[in-house]
Image (cartoon, helix red, strand yellow):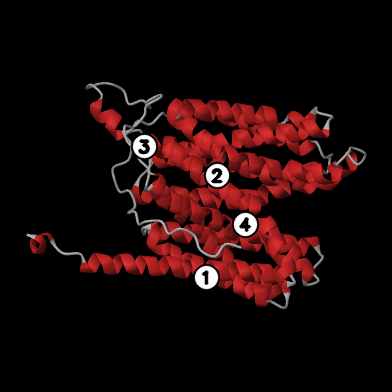
């Protein structure tokens, strides 16, 4: 169980002027809608087929290793996404955001619908891994474009909206997968074809943004286009981003604990009714959305907020650990999810504020890898801790303690930086 992570150095929110590709009115609404829809595609891949896994298990019951391989069909896209997002980010910076997004969106439909006609469980797992490859590109491109199109508090607003849409879509896709899956375990895979409707709209609506440096150096009258294969003649900000990515890896475990473990925690308290479990999960999901809305409305730099946000997450875990009945467990989950709803956009905005245009794709890819890597290991970490503490609730309590320690470390580091700034001599004192 992680205790502390490297503390990221402070970075102000980028308040520079937005890209000249900014628009207003219906065109702006369509652009935002497409970016949010694209950001939800990896969430669709993560939860859509969860309700039909038992039927899929029955269908491949005679296949060797089916007991382990069928659940892998659900989780392998997240693993692929975590492993490949940094490479997707590098390709984004070399080839351009829009080009990679369009290709990945079309391939997402091809690989996502492949299980409709595949009969081999191994081939289905392979197609799911390829879905994760396209998800890595789509998520990296959409997040990078949000950073390109918007700046300052407008960027904070849309990154928070991205969190809200992802959280709400998880519940929608879970219900959709269950409803469509009533007709057979293959049926939910048709939903992946929705990306074919998004691709032409993205091609017509989303422009290629250009860096400020490229715009300034271009001759008068030259249209602003994304530089293809442009390389900045400076080092990538590894050190500045390392702390944010390490904190994001830990934050992802905090973020995914309630969605992944809520049903098991309720079952340990004697709640077996699937309707009650679904309602409790929906309430927690709504709290995540409320947290993201709160973060967007605060209009503050993200770094100073991180200690308080992590402290809220830790408090929620503490209540869940102490809960002796379902209502109190839900209260703890709501407190935790209010915190995680603020945590994700705070971490993402913090990372974005450290990245120049030429580095934004690679940096976003690294951040995405850290986040989905934390998502993948979350249940494994809790499973490893559970035997040592005697219960899943105890493991959640340990994660809450770790979150409190990280929050205290971030707060202490911020205080040290503030004290150092106060004692720094003024220029006239050095003269």
Any mark on residue 256, and which? 4
Residue 103 sits in quarter:
top right
User: In the image, which is nearer the foreground, mark 1 or mark 4?
Assistant: 1
- Whole-number angstrom distance, CA of label 3 to CA of label 2: 19 Å
Rounded to the nearest angstrom, the CA distance separating label 4 from label 3 is 30 Å
* Residue 32 locus on image (x, y percent): 47, 40
- Give the vertical position of 225 relative to 330 (above or below): above
Q: Which class describes the residues within 10 Å of circle 1: few (<14), some (14-19), or many (20+)?
A: many
Compare marks 4 and 3 and give the one earlier in the sequence: 4
Q: Secondary structure at mark 4?
A: helix
- Dividing the image into 4 quarters, which one contains the N terminus? bottom right
Residue situated in front as seen by the camera: 361 or 288: 361
Residue depicted at 24% across the width and 26% down the height: 217
Apparent side of residue 244 relative to residue 224 in the rendered image (left or right): right
| 3D distance between C-alphas at marks 1 and 3 | 34 Å
Residue 96 position (above or below residue 83):
above
Question: Do residues under tags 1 and 2 come within 8 Å of each other at their CB atoms?
Answer: no
Q: Which residue is mark 1?
A: 404
Identify the disc placed on residue 369: 2
Mark 1 and mark 2 lie on one chain; the one further toward the N terminus is: 2
> Is residue 304 shown left or right of residue 65?
left
Q: Residue at x 57, y 31 (%)?
A: 198
Residue 389 vs 99, above or below: the answer is: below
Image location (x, y in percent) of residue 408: 46, 70
Residue 41 visible in the picture: no
Question: Does label 4 or label 2 sit earlier along the sequence?
Answer: 4
Q: Residue at x 51, y 28 (%)?
A: 100
CA distance for labels 1 and 2? 24 Å
Residue tagged 3:
357
Q: Residues within 10 Å of mark 3 (few under 14, many from 20)?
A: many
Q: CA distance from mark 1 to mark 4?
A: 17 Å
Name which quarter of the figure residue 10 lies in.
Answer: bottom left
């Amino acid at each position: 169980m992680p205790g502390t992570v490297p503390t990221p150095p402070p970075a102000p929110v980028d308040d520079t002027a937005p890209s000249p590709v900014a628009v207003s009115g219906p065109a702006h609404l369509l652009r935002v809608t497409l970016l949010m829809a694209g950001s939800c595609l990896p969430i669709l891949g993560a939860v859509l087929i969860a309700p039909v896994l038992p039927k899929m298990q029955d269908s491949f019951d005679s296949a060797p290793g089916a007991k382990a391989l069928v659940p892998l069909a659900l989780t392998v896209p997240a693993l692929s996404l975590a492993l490949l997002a940094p490479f997707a980010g590098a390709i984004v910076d070399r080839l351009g955001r829009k080009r990679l997004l369009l290709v990945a969106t079309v391939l997402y439909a091809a690989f996502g619908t492949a299980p409709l006609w595949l009969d081999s469980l191994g081939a289905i797992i392979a197609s799911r891994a390829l879905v994760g490859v396209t998800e890595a590109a789509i998520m990296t491109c959409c997040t990078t474009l949000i950073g390109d199109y918007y700046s300052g508090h407008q960027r904070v607003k849309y990154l928070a909206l991205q969190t809200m849409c992802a959280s709400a879509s998880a519940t929608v896709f879970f219900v959709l997968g269950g409803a469509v899956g009533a007709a057979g375990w293959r049926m939910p895979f048709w939903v992946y074809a929705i990306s074919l409707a998004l691709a032409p709209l993205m091609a017509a609506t989303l422009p290629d943004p250009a860096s400020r440096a490229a715009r300034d150096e271009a001759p008068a009258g030259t249209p602003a286009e994304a530089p293809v294969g442009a390389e900045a003649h400076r080092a990538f900000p590894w050190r500045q981003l390392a702390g944010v990515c390490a904190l994001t890896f830990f934050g992802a475990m905090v973020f995914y604990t309630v969605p992944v473990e809520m049903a098991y925690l309720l079952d340990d308290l004697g709640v077996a009714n699937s309707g009650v479990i679904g309602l409790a999960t929906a309430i927690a999901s709504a709290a995540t959305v409320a947290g993201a809305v709160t973060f967007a409305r605060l209009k503050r730099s993200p770094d100073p907020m991180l200690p308080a946000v992590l402290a809220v997450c830790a408090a929620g875990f503490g209540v869940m650990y102490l809960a002796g009945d379902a209502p109190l467990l839900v209260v703890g989950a709501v407190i935790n999810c209010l915190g995680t709803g603020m945590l994700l956009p705070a971490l993402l905005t913090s990372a974005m504020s450290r990245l120049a245009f030429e580095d934004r794709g690679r940096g976003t890819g690294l951040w995405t890898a850290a986040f989905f890597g934390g998502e993948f290991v979350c249940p494994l970490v809790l499973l490893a801790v559970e035997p040592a503490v005697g219960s899943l609730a105890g493991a959640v309590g340990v994660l809450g303690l770790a979150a409190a320690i990280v929050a205290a470390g971030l707060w202490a580091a911020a205080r040290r930086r503030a004290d150092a700034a106060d004692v720094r001599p003024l220029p006239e004192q050095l003269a």
